[in-house]
C-alpha cells in the first residue's frame, strides 16, 4: 500500500491535494520554486545540475504548462485495473 504524508495509508490523492495543485501548479510558481531550489543548493553537489535545468526551462515552457494543467486530472482519474495513468 502506498504511504502518504505523515505515514498515513493512501490509495488516491485527497480532493484537497488536487484542488491545491489546480491553483498552485503553474509555470510561474514552478519557475520560482526551481529558482529558490537552485539558490539553496549553492554549496551542494546538485547545484550545477539544478542550474542547468533552470537555464533550460524557457525552452520547455509549453511542455511545463501542459504538464501543470494535466497533472491534477491524472490524479483525479479513477485508476482502472491494468490501465496505468500516463501523460498525453
Image: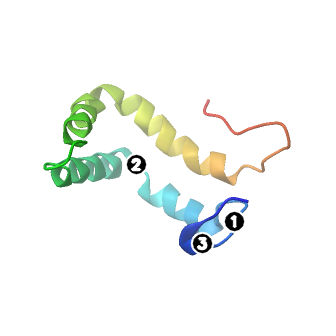
**Farthest front residue?**
45
Earlier residue among tags 1 and 2:
1
39 versus 66 height, above or below: below
Where does the N terminus fall, quadrant-wise?
bottom right
Where does the C terminus fall, quadrant-wise?
top right
Q: Which residue is mark 2?
A: 26
Earlier residue among tags 2 and 3:
3
> Cβ–Cβ below 8 Å for labels 1 and 2?
no
How far across and down, in percent of the image, does residue 87 sit?
61, 33
> Cβ–Cβ below 8 Å for labels 1 and 3?
no
Q: Nearer the viewer, mark 1 or mark 2?
A: 1
Is 81 displayed left or right of 56 in the figure? right
How far across and down, in percent of the image, does residue 40 sit?
19, 55
44 versus 61 height, above or below: below
Q: Quadrant of residue 36?
A: bottom left
In this view of the protein, which residue sits in the foreground, 47 or 19?
47
Q: Residue at x 58, y 60 (%)?
A: 18
Report the Cα–Cα distance between label 1 and label 3.
Answer: 9 Å
Q: Which mark is residue 78?
A: none
**Farthest left residue?**
43
Q: Which residue is mark 3?
A: 7
Q: Which residue is mark 1?
A: 10
Is 71 displayed left or right of 15 in the figure? left
Is 44 displayed left or right of 61 in the figure? left
Amino acid at each position: 500500500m502506498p504511504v502518504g504524508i505523515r505515514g498515513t495509508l493512501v490509495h488516491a490523492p485527497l480532493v484537497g491535494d488536487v484542488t491545491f495543485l489546480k491553483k498552485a501548479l503553474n509555470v510561474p510558481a514552478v519557475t520560482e520554486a526551481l529558482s529558490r531550489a537552485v539558490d539553496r543548493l549553492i554549496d551542494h553537489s546538485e547545484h550545477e545540475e539544478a542550474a542547468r535545468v533552470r537555464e533550460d526551462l524557457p525552452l520547455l515552457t509549453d511542455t511545463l504548462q501542459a504538464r501543470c494543467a494535466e497533472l491534477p486530472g491524472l490524479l483525479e482519474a479513477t485508476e482502472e485495473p491494468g490501465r496505468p495513468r500516463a501523460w498525453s
